[in-house]
Structures are given as structure tokens and as C-alpha cells.
Image (cartoon, helix red, strand yellow):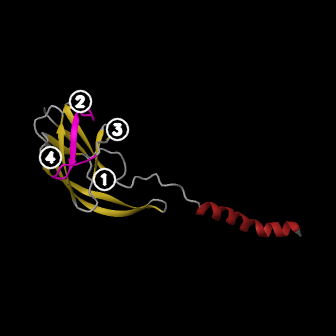
């Protein structure tokens, strides 16, 4: 008799255990602000580093951006309230600033139940550029650390 009750209740016990585990949520390690990664070559085989960059500004004004260098690239935060962003760079040893103006489409997507919604950027295009040469490597900006633009700057 006891065995019959156990056999009947066993599936419910298993479902209850899995149901409790399914309600637990993992913390969100997903970056909330996808950004553009820019590689700057000072010479054909030499990448610029934070030591080479004096200042970076967001927009046409001198609003400073925190300089972040991730895996050989400069991280540039894109504006979430507009379809374009501008950056001005001043490299050590250079006499003038370098300007980069970008245009993109914004798309909001659900990352996960824990992380919520995240803005992705697509169809990246360079509208204005004063680097010596520029190549768009990837025009979809997600949360990976992929390089999006490679540039060459002669000093």
C-alpha cells in the first residue's frame, strides 16, 4: 500500500523539485551597453594603446569619455537616444584631433529573463572620418568584444 502511494506521488515530487529549480534565476552577466570597438594602427603592425591616446570626447563638444581599452581595441559607448554618435580623439604627438561620426539603427531585444531588454545596433555606417584610412569590419554591434572598425593613423 505504501509502495502504491509512493509510485503515485513520485512524479509529482519530481515535478515539484524541477519546478523549484526552474524558478531560481541566475545573475545577469550580460553587458547592458553594447559598444563599438575601434582598433587604431599607428604603423602597419603597431596597435595604439591607452598610452598613445591623450583624450577622447563624445560628440562635437568636449564631454570626456572614460578611456577603456579592451583586448586591443578602444571601447566607445554609443548613444542609445539617437541614431548617431560622434567621437573626437587626440593622440599624443599628433597636432590635430581625429573625428569619427557614426550612423546606425537601434534595435531592442530581450537578452534573457534575468537581464531584460538590451539595445543592439545594426547597419553601422561611417558618416565622417578624418583617420588616414578606415575599414568597417563588422556593422552589427552586439555584446561580443568583436572589432567593428580598424583604422590607420599616420603621425
The CA distance from mark 4 to mark 3 is 22 Å
Q: Tell me if 51 is positioned left or right of 12 in this view.
A: left
| Mark positioned earlier in the residue sequence (3 or 1) | 3
Tell me, yes or no, whether the highlighted magenta stretch contains residue 140: no
- What's the mark number on residue 76? none
In the picture of the structure, the residue carrying the numbered disc 1 is 141
In the picture of the structure, the residue carrying the numbered disc 3 is 71
The CA distance from mark 4 to mark 2 is 21 Å
Q: Is residue 70 above or below residue 86?
A: above
Q: Tell me if 49 is positioned left or right of 32 in this view.
A: left
Mark 3 in CB contact with mark 2 (< 8 angstroms): no
Which stretch did the figure color magenta?
45-65
| Mark positioned earlier in the residue sequence (2 or 1) | 2
User: Residue 76, how many percent across, how many down?
Assistant: 27, 48
The CA distance from mark 3 to mark 1 is 16 Å
How many circles with numbers are drawn on the protein?
A: 4
Amino acid at each position: 500500500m505504501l509502495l502504491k502511494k509512493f509510485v503515485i506521488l513520485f512524479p509529482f515530487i519530481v515535478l515539484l523539485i524541477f519546478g523549484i529549480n526552474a524558478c531560481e534565476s541566475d545573475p545577469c552577466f550580460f553587458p547592458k551597453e553594447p559598444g563599438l570597438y575601434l582598433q587604431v594602427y599607428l604603423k602597419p603592425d603597431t596597435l595604439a594603446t591607452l598610452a598613445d591616446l591623450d583624450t577622447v570626447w563624445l560628440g562635437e563638444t568636449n564631454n570626456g569619455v572614460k578611456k577603456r581599452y579592451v583586448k586591443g581595441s578602444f571601447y566607445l559607448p554609443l548613444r542609445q537616444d539617437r541614431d548617431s554618435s560622434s567621437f573626437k580623439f587626440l593622440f599624443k604627438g599628433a597636432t590635430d584631433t581625429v573625428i569619427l561620426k557614426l550612423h546606425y539603427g537601434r534595435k531592442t531585444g530581450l537578452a534573457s529573463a534575468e537581464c531584460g531588454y538590451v539595445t543592439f545596433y545594426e547597419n553601422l555606417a561611417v558618416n565622417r572620418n578624418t583617420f588616414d584610412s578606415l575599414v568597417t569590419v563588422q556593422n552589427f554591434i552586439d555584446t561580443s568584444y568583436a572589432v567593428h572598425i580598424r583604422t590607420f593613423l599616420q603621425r
